[in-house]
């Protein structure tokens, strides 16, 4: 895939995620993907990949943070006993 497509898809995914965060519309990226697909299937695929990677990273990061938070809470509870 060309650097141009990757760069454009990445920037568009970043901007789309910001809109999703601000509006609370967690499916907005689908609308953007549909719009892209009408003119460039290649850019649509690259964009959707970029969004999915970002969404997956967010979910994994939340899991890691929750695990650590839970561990610290349990450790503090044990120390207080």
Image (spheres, rainbow, N blue to C red):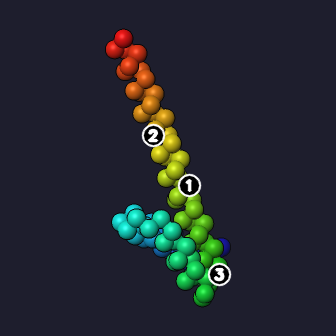
Marks 1 and 2, how far apart at CA: 14 Å
Q: Which residue is mark 1?
A: 56
Could you tell me which residue is drawn at 42 percent across and 21 percent down?
75
Residue 67 in percent (x, y) is at 49, 35
Q: Residue at x 47, y 45 (%)?
A: 62
Q: Nearer the viewer, residue 27 or 11?
A: 27
For the point 54% across and 65% down, the residue is 51
Mark 1 is surrounded, within 10 Å at the Cα level, by few (under 14), some (14 to 19) or many (20 or more) other residues, namely: few
Can the viewer see residue 3? Answer: no
Q: Secondary structure at mark 1?
A: helix
Tag 2, which secondary structure?
A: helix
Give the percent coordinates (x, y) of residue 37.
Answer: 61, 82
Which residue position holds label 3?
41
Residue 61, x across and y down, in percent: 49, 46
The residues tagged by marks 3 and 1 sit, at their Cα atoms, a distance apart of: 22 Å
Q: Quadrant of residue 22?
A: bottom left
Work out which quarter of the rendered image holds the C terminus and state it.
top left
> Are circles 3 and 1 on residues that touch, CB within 8 Å?
no
* Residue at 56% across, 77% down: 33
Farthest residue to the top: give it.
Answer: 81
Q: Is residue 36 above or below residue 79?
A: below
Res 17 quadrant in image: bottom left
Above or below residue 31? Residue 79 is: above
Q: Position of residue 12 (x, y in %)?
A: 48, 73
User: Which circle marks residue 65 in the picture?
Assistant: 2
CA–CA distance between discs 3 and 2?
Answer: 36 Å
Tag 1 near tag 2, CB within 8 Å: no
Q: Earlier in the sequence, mark 1 or mark 2?
A: 1
């Amino acid at each position: 895939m060309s650097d141009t497509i990757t760069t454009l898809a990445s920037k568009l995914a970043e901007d789309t995620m910001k809109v999703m965060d601000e509006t609370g519309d967690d499916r907005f990226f689908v609308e953007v993907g549909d719009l892209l697909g009408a003119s460039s299937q290649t850019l649509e695929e690259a964009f959707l990949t970029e969004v999915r990677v970002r969404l997956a990273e967010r979910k994994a990061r939340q899991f890691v943070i929750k695990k650590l938070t839970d561990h610290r809470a349990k450790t503090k509870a044990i120390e207080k006993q």
